[in-house]
Amino acid sequence: MLKQRKLVIASRESRLALWQSEHVRDALIRHHPGLEVEILGMTTRGDQILDRTLSKVGGKGLFVKELEAALAEGRADIAVHSAKDVPMELPEGFVLAAIGEREDPRDCFVSNRYASLEALPDGAVLGTSSLRREAQVRSRLPALTVTPLRGNVITRLAKLDRGEYDAIVLAAAGLRRLGLADRIRSTIDVGTSLPAPGQGALAIECRAGRADLVSLLAPLHHAPTALCVRAERAVSRALSGSCQLPLAAYAEVDSGELWLRGLVASPDGTRVIEAEIRADASRGSAGADGSSDDWPEQLGQALAGLLRERGAGAIIDALV
């Protein structure tokens, strides 16, 4: 049982992050009537540094460190993250207690002038915050001008609307969750832009040893999504994935199998290494933190090995 009847959620203060935390809060209250849930809004380093790409200022971990500090200091009980923003190695003393059901995992194309990536003319300016997206776009459409795009979802849309870009690429999940699906001109098939590990899923973090919180969060945990996210994160972990490496990993349950695809590219998109692997999806349970059967992690490690064999190792070594 929960040690108290009040629970505090640490959250970034962007509209999307607050939506995610409110979503978790409302679900907890539905499942546990009488539970009081408060949201502690925080500004992270990742939110403050907007003039440089994440790959140059420390990576996605900048979005979670302050929230983890609030957990460590007892100011909050759980932190809600976009799973794709959670570093592949958690600090000692922290665990992922639950993985929520995944929204649309795809990237999407947003533009006020053009209908799709393929409709962009040569030289058109495309904005993205992700080396993964940039490398895949450059590989297929090298005549485009791809430039950095930082800020939260609303800020990025505002930059597009001011004419700073001809188009931008965003995660479809964020726009859908904010009620902005009408801004999506087209979704990009995963075969064209393979998603980031964990994209579209929510991850709920807490301090290790809080069995009461893991039990409380159990109704929010979505086992099929957890299978996929754990395998995806294992690919990145095995390849020392960071914001400096254009890396993608996406898993889905297909005809009773877990189908895991991975990609490593050079930043300029001139080299793209791809591989895929399948396994029986009914092999075991799927806790968020890998405390149960670890076969999804083993599958991710196997795919990482295939990618290395096909040339990903040379790309990684060149970036070190």
Image (cartoon, helix red, strand yellow):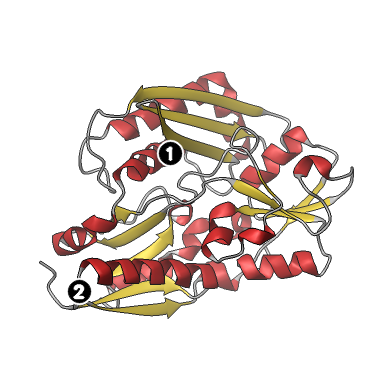
Residue 198 located left or right of residue 98: right
Of mark 1 and mark 2, the one earlier in the sequence is 2
In the foreground, 254 or 264: 254
Side of 296 where 176 appears, left or right:
right
Q: Amino acid at mark 1?
A: Glu
Which circle marks residue 208 in the picture? Answer: none
- Give the residue at x 39% y 43%: 229
Image disc number at residue 232: 1
Q: Taking 2 as reference, is 256 above or below it? A: above
Kind of element beneath mark 2: loop
Q: Quadrant of the C terminus?
A: top right
How far across and how far down the image is residue 1, in percent?
10, 66
Q: Place residue 121 in its image quadrant.
A: top right
What residue is disc 2 on?
Answer: 33
In the foreground, 89 or 27: 27
Q: What's under tag 2, amino acid-wise?
A: Pro
Image quadrant in which you'd find residue 27? bottom left
Percent coordinates x, y for residue 177 in the rendering: 51, 62
**What residue lies at 48% left-to-right and 44% top-to-bottom?**
197
Task: Name the residue rendered at 21%, 76% in the picture.
Answer: 35
| Label 2: few (<14), some (14–19) or many (≥20) C-alpha neighbours in 10 Å | few
